[in-house]
Amino acid sequence: MKQSSSSSSSSRPGKPGLLGQLADFFEDRTGYRAFVHEALYERVPGGARWRYVWGSTLVFAFMTQVITGLVLWASYSASAQTAWESVYYIQHEMAGGWLLRGIHHVMAQMMVVLLALHLMQVVIDGAYRAPREVNFWLGLILMMLVLGMALTGYLLPWDQKGYWATRVATNLAGLVPLIGPSLQQVVVGGPDYGHHTLTRFFALHAGFLPATLVALLVVHLTLFRKHGLCARQPITRPDAMFWPDQVLKDAVAMLAVMAVVLGVILLPALRAVLEGRPIVPGELGAELGAPADPSQPYAAARPEWYFLFLFQFLKVFEGWGASGEFLGAIVVPGLVMGMMFLMPIVGRWDLGHRFNVGFTVALLAGVGLLTALAMREDYCATWIDAAALADVGELIEKTGGDEAQIAATLGNDPEKIRAFATRKKSWDAARHSRAFMDASEQAEVDAARAVALAGRPERIPPTGALELVRGDALSQGPKLFAANCASCHGHIDPQQADAQALLAKTSAANLHGFGTQAWVRGLLDPEQVAGPGYFGNTAHKEGEMVNFVQHDLTDRSIWKPEDIAAVIAGLAAEAGVTHGETTVAPEVALVERGRVLLASSEHCGSCHTFRDNGTAAGSAPDLTGWGSREWLVGIITDPTHERFYGDTNDRMPSFGKAEQGSLPMLPARQIALIADWLRGEWYRPAVAGH
Amino acid sequence: MAGSPEESVKRPPTPDQRRGFLARMLALVCGGLATLPPLVAGLWVVLDPLRRQGGAAAFLPVTELPSVPDDGMPRQFTVIDDRVDAWTGFVAEPIGAVYLRRRPGSQQVEALSATCPHAGCFVEIDKAARCFRCPCHNSTFTLDGGIVAPSPSPRAMDSLECRVEPTGGIAVKWQNFLTGVAAKVVKS
């Protein structure tokens, strides 16, 4: 624009127009036309080429990061209690936040790709040779700065993914000899990860690194102009000007880069439209995991894809101990970088240039290969046929993995043993991959849940979203149940296909649907009460309750079917489990009748205490408030209490009872979470999505 | 290098020149389009606060009648309410302050906002001088909130609707007003 106005003012004779006068005013005081001219009318030897666009697209990508980064900065809050929360707010609540974050996130990855392309072009064209050595070195430093920004940016949302990946990265920094531990502590901002890790990473990401980058970029571009473009040889076409010939190619390339970025962001939206699902803007662009939690394992931790090769490379040194990690994470990458810095020297000889090209191609191929290997390890379960390897797992389980026993089972046939070893490798790989994929899937579920909780009308408490997640029965219940209850109890839907096989492995009651009428109906079913879903695998299999259900309850002279139905309704009414459903009006009369039977000394009340029926505690669990939150918390806390099983308790630990001078197995809060989860009580958004 | 001015004097333009013009326009259009998404996304997010609205004014319980003696001297009370700040939900947070006053023998309670109508500073009470004074620009008000001329404040202190519940609780309709203007306009 400046160019066109200045040329029009100089081409027309006579008095210039208002715009021209203004331009002249500034020209007289700044001499900007010379600058603009200098910037635009650079000679491109041999004409404009597509292969020269990479540097410009990198500058463009960086400018995009500056624009989007500054606006993100205006909404981001760097502290352990607000980082995830503010990013959640940007992504899910601020208008256009998903697009802004999406562009910043995808363009960051794009920059890494463009860096690789730019580097390749420079090396292949020999643009690092005299007199351009210093500019090549500057380029390498710029590359490291960009990678540094990628690394520091990954942590800022303070989600599980960024948190665990950064822990690994900073621990590796601790391997540097002598200063390692101190270096790590300085970077992390203290002995532990927290507020100052975020403020430091943020200052690096948005301040120190980009400021250094801008300063070096200015020198890089100035030197580039000083030396001129390193043209592709031999020159066969006439020279052209940077403006507009090369600029046009650059601009088209920039547009293509932006199109790819937008494509990556919007593709899931297109898929949603095609599949007839509603588009949820918050789910587009950059993902946001569950809030960082140092107390929760995160098996899906991986660096961003462009660092996967380093991650995979470290595995080569597995079993070497700390010195192996030091080699893999610091020495070898350091040597490779050193090699690249030496390229201009090596490239002085013709053979040296070929070596450099070969080295760069081999390096990128190696990076590609390692990345592919890492991906394969993570996702091989998708194509390895697990069913065909089932016998491997069975044999290992049967023998406890003892090699001698396995060999014996295979008839000590070396051929078979070798074949088994090969298959065991596949089986192992598939198992690891499956674990990773399950963890990734779980991470997505946890992330979606954290977002749903953050969207509650009460908003996020000042203590942060992690507090919400930790207090959420839906996400914590299954984990606590798996860690503390599932070694004995099942939580298996009886309707699912493999229910019986799974139940056979349990040694205590199936707690799926505990408290519902269906559960009580099963308990009072002579066919089921001694089965694996109830008392079948416990000491109570021979107990009075089983005896009662199998004999007394089937005696129609004492128990009429309608009375059993009343007891079922009455007991379930004590639990009041709704699973979030709007309560179906209970059959009041039936429940009333059930309560009478529960209390009656002729019926349940002969053993069980129920309200004020006077039956002494200790012979059988108290049915008052059976299955309610309070009752469940009570029995998990201490099943040996006389209100529950007393002396007849079969192996169930008293999770909430503290032994002398020690802590209970589970804090009261976690016991309450298990109770809430079993009862299906957790926050449910009023409408799906918002 | 500087050959273009002389060339453009000649007409009609050569095919080369026409091609050059096209290339220039195309370069500008492509460059402009490529830069647009980050600018649009940035502006979109920057303007997000315009979509947000404060909560509707509500009567909030402030204190009990006996805490406001009928001696005509205003007393300062903290207003407490649940508050949402972007993503954070605060429960029962101090959100501001009011002055409550009862004239001798009266059961009527008068409420004044502690926010100075001039520039929004917190008006203090000067018990010795029996007046309100703003520490920022010395706006002075009488004990019933009336303006004491000359004053930087364009209007008297903002009175708030106030009611005494049958139980003796005092509730104040919590509102903010535009500062710096003569008219008392509710800030939305």
Image (spheres, rainbow, N blue to C red):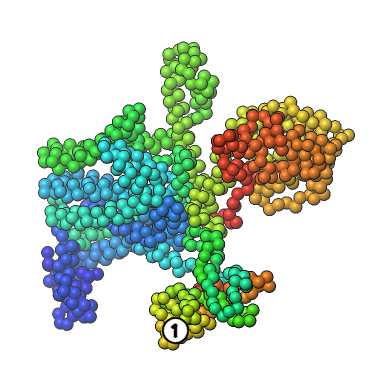
Instruction: Using residue A439 as the reference point, say whether residue B68 is left or right of it.
Output: right
- Could you classify mark 1 by the number of other residues whose Cα lies within 10 Å: few (under 14), some (14-19), or many (20 or more)? some
As drawn, is A183 to the left or to the right of A127? right
Q: How many marks?
A: 1
Instruction: Name the residue located 51 percent from the left edge and 45 percent from the top edge.
Output: A445
Residue in the foreground of this view, choosing between A515 and A280: A515
Does any portion of residue A263 appear in the rendered image?
no
State whether residue A132 is above or below residue A342: below
Nearer to the camera, A531 or B71: B71
- Can the viewer see residue A160? yes
Can you give x and y, in whole percent of width and height, for residue A264 in the image? Answer: 40, 51
- Residue A561 appears at what percent x and percent y? 83, 39
Identified at 65% across, 37% down, the residue is A638
Q: Quadrant of the N terminus of chain B?
A: bottom left
The residue tagged 1 is B154
| Three-letter amino acid code at the position of disc 1 | Pro
Residue A303 versus residue B182 in the image, above or below:
above
Residue A166: name its quadrant. Answer: top left
Reply above or below: A292 against A652.
below
Which residue occupies 21% across, 49% down?
A: A139
Compared with residue A82, is residue A13 higher up or lower down, i.e. above or below? below
Q: Is residue A535 left or right of residue A29?
A: right
Rendered image quadrant of residue A537: top right
